[in-house]
Image (tube, rainbow, N blue to C red):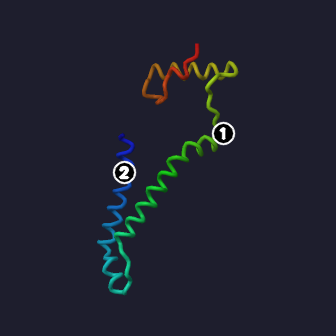
């Protein structure tokens, strides 16, 4: 829930800053003086839609791209002694410091 709040808050903060910059620089009055009929509210809504869509796409692709870029292989069932040792060690670390891993420790603990 906190992540959702931070996500929405940061995107809304960007829109507030963008709106403030438009007003401080007088872009709306400058456009009207030159005869340009541009609705800045519609522009901000369009920017919000693009920003939210872009950040969601980035959020959904980041984990997959990181795994592909680092050539990560997720170990669910150990196939050799090294993988078994790695899973047991990770489970022990998780039991000593529960905040170190966000996954369920029983998934990694192998007996």
**Mark closer to the observer (2, 1):** 2
Nearest the viewer among 33 and 49 is 49
Nearest the viewer among 84 and 76 is 76
Residue 17, how many percent across, how many down? 33, 62
> Would you place residue 29 above or below residue 95 in this image?
below
Image quarter where the C terminus lies is top right
> Would you place residue 57 above or below residue 43 in this image?
above
- Please rate how many residues cluster around mark 1, counting C-alpha atoms within 10 Å: few if below 14, some from 14 to 19, many from 20: few
The CA distance from mark 2 to mark 1 is: 32 Å
| Residue on which the image places disc 1 | 71
Q: Residue at x 62, y 28 (%)?
A: 75
Q: Residue at x 42, y 28 (%)?
A: 99
Residue 3, how many percent across, how many down? 39, 42
Please give the label number shown on residue 8: 2
Q: In the image, is 20 to the left or to the right of 3?
A: left
Tell me the quarter of the picture where residue 31 sits: bottom left
Please give the label number shown on residue 57: none
Tell me the quarter of the picture where residue 79 sits: top right
Tell me the quarter of the picture where residue 64 sits: top right
Residue 103, how many percent across, how many down? 49, 28
């Amino acid at each position: 829930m906190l992540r959702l709040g931070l996500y929405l808050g940061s995107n809304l903060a960007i829109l507030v800053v963008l709106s403030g910059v438009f007003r401080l620089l007088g872009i709306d009055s400058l456009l009207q003086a030159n005869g340009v009929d541009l609705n800045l509210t519609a522009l901000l809504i369009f920017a919000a839609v693009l920003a939210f869509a872009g950040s969601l796409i980035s959020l959904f692709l980041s984990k997959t791209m990181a795994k592909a870029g680092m050539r990560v292989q997720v170990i669910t069932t150990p196939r050799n002694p090294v993988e078994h040792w790695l899973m047991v060690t990770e489970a022990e670390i998780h039991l000593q410091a529960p905040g170190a891993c966000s996954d369920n420790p029983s998934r990694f603990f192998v007996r």
